[in-house]
Image (cartoon, rainbow, N blue to C red):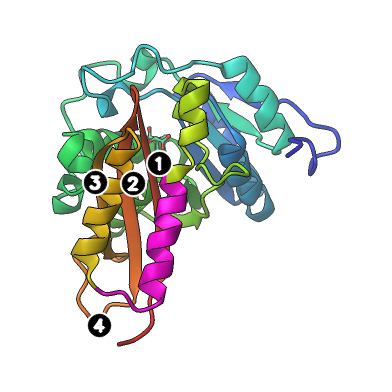
Amino acid sequence: MTHNATVPNPKMPTLCPTQSALRQALRGRGVIGFVPTMGNLHDGHIQLMRMARERADCVVASVFVNRLQFAPHEDFDRYPRTLARDCELMATAGVDYVFCPTETELYPEPQTCLVDPGPLATLHEGEFRTGFFRGVATVVSKLFHIVSPDFAIFGKKDYQQLQVIRHMVRQLAMPIEIVAAETARAEDGLALSSRNGYLSPSERAEAPRLYRLLSTLAAQLQSGHHELWQLETDAMATLAAHGWRPDYVRIRRQSDLQPATEACQDLVILSAAHLGSTRLIDNLEVQRPAR
Ligand code: PAF
């Protein structure tokens, strides 16, 4: 994909490192579309920003590596910080403003007031990354207060994150529309992710197996296979047989990520697995036929 396909003369976005600069810049700017990120952008992020550009008078993106959502053993310190390159990409997507606070700007004092998204945050990713969704919900709610967007766009790649944010916005009556964007994939099916850059060449060659597996499961569900537990167990075994360390492969209902009843047709297959030292997640929505 060429990044400058839709914007003939890309204009660099204005950097706003402080809350006050951003609030001032956004005064009277009409419909505001917002894309929160942790930077190290890839085509998936750029697609979200282009979607925002089509619907908004003013597009704001944030670039902030949020310490609150990283466990002590996770990759906070080595998470790539690439703001200059990110800005060039955002220019091609027509982003107007980039909110890029320092840690002291966003967390000037220890953040003891936290947003707990409730039971949804303890499932799946929450089982393996304690406190992750509390960190995400806290920073996203803080960013929402600062940016005051009319809508915000989140990728389905982080499916549970999307559901957690929808839940938070609904329960806390935040006047923000949450727009979901389809997962952007490489030609071989691998979901685009900033963490793909950690993969060695041989791991990168192996990585698309995860999406192929999800696609096979989806086809099995669509052809009427209803032993969900068996499908999940077989998928975990397939990954393990190819050198992965799977955390989970689970078939759940889309609405609340809980086990699906027989009547439920709107399913999602959620997965997370380690390949070498990199943890990949992917998911696929499936509509299965009525029984
Ligand atoms: O998806 C991400 O990149 C992050 O979780 C988010 C939403 C920017 C919050 O830090």
Residue 211 is one of the magenta-drawn residues: yes
Residue on which disc 4 sits: 263
Between marks 3 and 4, how big is the CA–CA gap? 23 Å
| Secondary structure at numbered mark 2 | helix
User: Which comes sooner in the sequence, label 2 or label 1?
Assistant: 1
Give residue 178's position: percent from left, percent from top. Answer: 44, 55
Asked which secondary structure carries label 4, the reply is loop
Count of numbered badges drawn on the protein: 4
Amino acid under disc 3: Tyr
Earlier-in-chain disc, 3 versus 2: 2
| 244 relative position to 20: left or right | left
The residue that disc 3 covers is 248
Q: Is residue 37 above or below residue 151?
A: above
Q: Nearer the viewer, residue 137 or 197?
A: 197
**How many other residues sit within 10 Å of disc 2, few (<14), some (14-19) or many (≥20)?**
many
Q: Main secondary structure of the magenta part?
A: helix
Q: What amino acid type is highlighted by mark number 2?
A: Gln
Residue hosting label 2: 161
Question: Dot 1 corresponds to which residue?
Answer: 144
Q: Which of 12 and 79 is in front in this view?
A: 79
